[in-house]
Amino acid sequence: MPSAEVILVFFGTSLLLGIAPGPDNIFVLTQSAVYGVRAGLLTTLGLVTGLCVHTTAVALGVAAIFQSSALAFTLLKAVGAAYLLYLAWLSFRAGALSARTPDTGGAGGPAFPGYAALYRRGILMNVTNPKVSLFFLAFLPQFCDPARGSLAVQVLILGALFMLATIIVFFSVAVLGGRLALWLNRSPRSQMLVHRAAGLVFTGLAVMLIFTGR
């Protein structure tokens, strides 16, 4: 098990990484602004579930495949970009009333995907991004010490700490996005604008992923 000093340094570093603007916290903010705070919380839980997959992959050594195989990296990247473009298409075609949910003061519209679907979006958004596995592969082992026991166990512990830091930061982002949703959903025009903005965010994330190198 990592020492207390290593755990404190790692957790502080993880908090800073979570605060730094990136695709995941922008994704949470967008979903919260469109569908309300609970949507952001469920999206965050989905992203954290995806982190479980990446942490396990690093602990088992599977992530090294994406580092060494250009084909595996490209295929996973293509799947992730395609899914983000699909979300962009849904956002661009969404109507004004679709943003209304119990969080935002309405009865819900036909385009609201449901909280379970938002949770799945978070998982897919994270799992299909090979950059996360490569980041964990490079980041987590730096805080491991072979003299302190199993490296796989240490990676799992550090991964859990990273997830806790992510939850703390992203829940705060979700609350901020939920407040934006209450303000934006006061008028149909604002609702349309936030959907268009969400579509642009998803498109931008897809383009960034497509041009990501190993």
Image (spheres, rainbow, N blue to C red):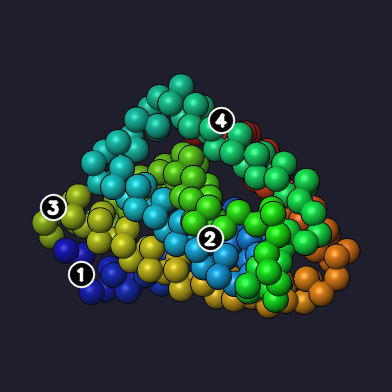
The crowding category of the residue bearing disc 4, from other C-alpha atoms within 10 Å (few below 14, some 14 to 19, many at least 20), is some
Contact, CB < 8 Å: mark 1 with mark 3? no
Q: Give above or below for 82 relative to 154.
A: above
- Helix, strand or loop status at disc 3: loop
Q: Mark 1 = which residue? A: 3
For the residue pair 132 and 7, the one nearer the viewer reads as 132
The crowding category of the residue bearing disc 2, from other C-alpha atoms within 10 Å (few below 14, some 14 to 19, many at least 20), is some
Is residue 150 among the parts visible in the rendering?
yes
Q: Mark 2 = which residue? A: 115
Is residue 177 among the parts visible in the rendering?
no
- Helix, strand or loop status at disc 2: helix
Of tags 4 and 3, which is closer to the observer? 4
- Helix, strand or loop status at disc 4: helix
Which numbered disc flags the more N-terminal residue, 4 or 3? 4
Disc number for residue 44: none
Q: Amino acid at mark 4?
A: Ala
Q: Amino acid at mark 1?
A: Ser
Q: CA distance from mark 4 to mark 1?
A: 39 Å
Q: CA distance from mark 2 to mark 3?
A: 38 Å
Contact, CB < 8 Å: mark 2 with mark 3? no
Q: Position of residue 198 (x, y in %)?
A: 72, 54
Residue at horizontal 76 percent and vertical 56 percent from the top: 195
Q: CA distance from mark 2 to mark 1?
A: 38 Å
Q: CA distance from mark 1 to mark 3?
A: 13 Å
Residue at horizontal 53 percent and vertical 52 percent from the top: 117
Q: Give above or below for 7 relative to 156.
A: below
Q: Mark 4 = which residue? A: 78
